[in-house]
Amino acid sequence: TENKERTSLQEQIRQLAYQNEQMRREADKLSSALRGGTKVQGDWGEMILHNILQQSGLREGEDFELQKSVDAAGDNKRPDAVLHFPNHNDLIIDSKVSFTAYDSYMHAATDEERRTFAKQHLDSVYNHVRQLADRDYASRNKLSYDFVIMFIPIESMFLLALDEARTQGRNLWNEAYERRVIIMTP
């Protein structure tokens, strides 16, 4: 009986090692794909947002729309998602992925490199906040709340930006909120 259990345990350990190796390969593929450029990063962030909305039980076309045009003054802007609430208000969500500096930070060899890449990452996040604030989606969609959600699909990206802002004596969340941008993660 002991030999059978030991053999079974060895087989389970082999299976875990195999699954771990598969997950590592998939993570490497994702990381490589995300290094492919801002378009790839943006598409991936939109896919994560779409999956979260669907897995929350919301119905596309009824409860939310993807890439819905929000037109004003002749120019056409398309946020990643518009959530429709029962009270006839809309919530605009735009996914933003700041992967390049974040990835460099994660692979940095020295503390000095990490500090440099953390600053670059925070600058990228602030740039996304400014871009969303400048788009002024709320005035473009009369049903919209007066703020927009900036969705960051990787929690640790957001935490790194928060930590770096705090290191600089700033408050990223409050500064974004003052520009009517609320930062959220999955």
Image (cartoon, helix red, strand yellow):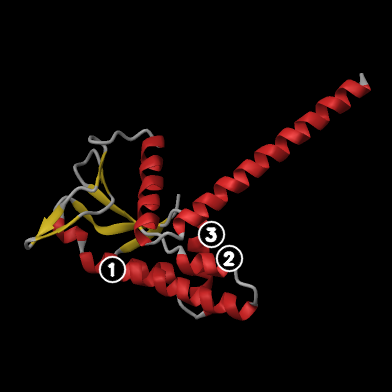
Judged left or right of residue 166, residue 23 is right
Res 62 → quadrant: top left
Q: CA distance from mark 3 to mark 2?
A: 10 Å
Q: Is residue 93 above or below residue 51?
A: below
Occupied quadrant, residue 10: top right
Q: Amino acid at mark 2?
A: Met
Relative placement, left or right, of 11 versus 121 is right
Question: Mark 3 or mark 2, which has the lower sequence index?
Answer: 2
Q: Which callout, 1 or 2, points at the residue further toward the start of the chain?
A: 2
Against 184, is 56 above or below?
A: above
Label 3 residue SS: helix
Outermost residue toward the right in this view: 2
Image side of residue 122 versus residue 138, left or right: right
Residue 9 vs residue 119, the one in the foreground: 9
Q: Which mark identifies residue 131? A: 1
Give 164 or 74, whichever is nearer the viewer.
Answer: 74
Amino acid type of the residue that numbered disc 1 sits on in the rendered structure: Gln
Can residue 166 be seen here? The reply is no
Residue 99 in view: yes
Q: Which mark is residue 156?
A: 3
Badge nearest the viewer, 1 or 2: 2
Q: Residues within 10 Å of mark 3 (few under 14, many from 20)?
A: few
Residue 134 % position (x, y): 23, 69
Binning the other alpha carbons within 10 Å of mark 2 as few (below 14), some (14 to 19) or many (20 upward) gives few
> Residue 106 shows which numbered tag?
2
